[in-house]
Structures are given as structure tokens and as C-alpha cells.
Image (tube, helix red, strand yellow):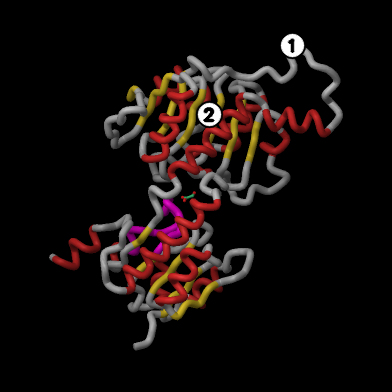
Amino acid sequence: MSKPRVFVTRRLLESGLSLVQEFCEADIWFGEMPPSREEILGKIAGQDGLLCLLTDRIDAEVMEAAGPGLKVISNCAVGVDNVDVSAATARSIPVGNTPGVLTEATADMTFALLMAAARRVVEGERQVRSGGWKTWSLDNLLGADFAGATLGLVGFGRIGRAVARRASGFGMRVIYTDPNPTAPQPGEEALQVDLDTLLHESDFVSLHTPLTDETRGMMNAAAFAKMKATAVLVNTSRGPVVDQPALYQVLKSHQIFAAALDVTVPEPLPTDNPLLTLENCIIVPHIASASRQTRQNMSRMAAENLIAGLKGERLPNCVNPEVYGREQG
Ligand code: GLV
């Protein structure tokens, strides 16, 4: 029996690659850079499945180019804002993602960024390399305290809660907002508040929300105006949640203390972006889930979603489960 045909938009790590190659006739894009729009539209034609990364925009046009045989879209990321999920649902195509396996790694990176920004690690490193370290002094690179500080989590899903668990070990008070709150578990002690209260009271604000119409641009000039002058902002969610020109203004004028971003608009961020001129802004290249084991687990989970969809089985992690209800009904 012939194997199902799939397009994979980038090289997966071994745990996923071997599964895909065993089960599918796979056209894998081995380029370092993502396939262009034209290349995706050309390669997807006639495929049974698509395994893509967050760098690929998968919309109705791609689904049409695939043709009626497309059975599954598997995104190798937890966020699916690069996929038009409604367009997939309208075509009864299940969309898979990779939740859970990247929670701890992303929470670790969030804390690394919180600490680096608050304690000016990157500035300190630059000071040493540039010969600016003249002597030990009482006021060189003073930063923020963690013990007793308030951490505000915008989004209290898996990752936000994992950050709350870490914060309790640092003696922090944790508050959060979430449109669909679930009660904190033991070890995740946190108080639910509204966004205004969170912005006013937090010494650290960390974003853990998906990108939606509601969250796009939510951290804008008006939101920054509510934050403390000593506050630190960390974004490991999606770049467009933050209004970057507004962030530049408040960092430059020291209306907030510092920011650390794992995600930006656009990605990659051009080297002439004004944010990169600021000492109080740290930017890393969307690597919050980039631990060795996590990326293996994401690759495997994306392959498992793809294969389940090709077999006509329910995806282990499906973001539009309504496609199944519709088929049965
Ligand atoms: C990374 O940003 C992801 O959504 O997995």
C-alpha cells in the first residue's frame, strides 16, 4: 500500500523526523530558511498532510492549493496564530499543536529573561567586554529585587502557572489575569485581578497569552502608563501583543525600568530597529522553548499529530476538535 504524501516545511529533530519518514512519503524542506510563499503553494499541491512551523503562514489559499485530499495540518508549536484555524475547520481539517512539552522550558526562559533584565546581566557583560568595568562600587548597575516583589502574569495557562511555581521559590507575590481562569493548584499561589490592577501593582509583568484579536497590541502606551517606573516587562508569548514603538518610548524615557523580549515584530528583528539601541532592553531570537529535550519532544508530538490525522484518527493534540463533532453529526 502506498504511503500518504506529506509536505514538511523544515527539518524536524530526529524523534519526529524518523517517525515521519517511516510512515509517510515525505517531501521535507531541508533549507535553513523557510520555504517562500510560492514554494509552499507549489509543494502543498496534492499532499495528504502538512507539517509546518510557526514561520509558515498557512491560510485558506494554502489549503485550496493543497486540494481536497488534505487531511491534517500539524503545527510544530503550541501557538497556532500562523494557521487560519477557522479556514481549516470550515474544510473539516484538524489542526494539531504541541502543548505541554514546552511548558517548563518556556517558563525557565521567562525567568532567565526576568532576572537578566532586572539584574542587568547583559549590560554588565557589555560593560566588561568594553572595558567599562573600572572598579567595584556600591552603585554599579543597580537592579530590582525579587523577594517580596509582585509578579503579574497576563495569562494563567500552563506556562503562566509554571512561571508562578518558580516565583514562589523566589518569595514573590503572584497576581494574574486570564479570560478563562482555572484555580491555581498547590504551589501556584496566585491571586486573580483585573488587568488595570495587575499593571498598577506589578514589579514584573510577564505575558503568557495567545495572540488573538483581543490581545493584539494590548501592551500599548495606555497600558505602559499604568505600570510602575521600576517595572520590568517580559514577553515570551507573541510579538504583536506588544506595541513596539510605544515600548521604545517608555523604555527610552525610563517610564518603565526594563524589558526583555523573546518575540518581536517582525521576526527576525532588523538590526536597525530602535529597540536595539537601548541599554534597558534585552532581545533574544524566539528561543523560549529551545532546550534540547523540548525541541525533540515538540518534533515527536508534531509527527504524532500528523500521522494520527493521516490515519483518520483523532489528533492527540487538536486545536479545533469541533471538526470531529461535525463529522459524527
Ligand atoms: C513557540 O513560540 C510556540 O508557540 O511553540
Q: Nearer the viewer, residue 4 or 206?
A: 4
Report x, y in % for residue 101: 42, 49
The extreme bottom residue here reads 1
Q: Nearer the viewer, residue 240 or 280?
A: 280
Membership of 200 in magenta stretch: no
Is the CB of the residue bearing disc 2 within 8 angstroms of ligand 1? Answer: no
Membership of 83 in magenta stretch: yes
The extreme top residue here reads 138
Residue 59 sits above or below residue 155 on the image: below
Report x, y in % for residue 216: 45, 41
SS category of the residue bearing label 1: loop
Left or right: where does residue 133 sit relative to residue 90?
A: right
Q: Main secondary structure of the magenta part?
A: loop
Q: Residues within 10 Å of mark 2 (few under 14, many from 20)?
A: some
Q: Residues within 10 Å of mark 1 (few under 14, many from 20)?
A: few
Residue for point 60% across, 36% down: 245
Left or right: where does residue 129 sit relative to residue 164?
A: right
* Real-space CA distance between mark 2 and mark 1, rounded to the nearest whole angstrom: 34 Å
Residue range highlighted in magenta: 74-88
Amino acid under disc 2: Ala
Q: Report which residue position mark 1 lands on.
A: 138
Residue for point 30% across, 62% down: 315
Q: Is residue 236 visible to us here? A: yes
Residue 154 sits above or below residue 270 on the image: above
Q: Report which residue position mark 2 lands on.
A: 221
The numbered dot on residue 296 is none
Report x, y in % for residue 147: 51, 17
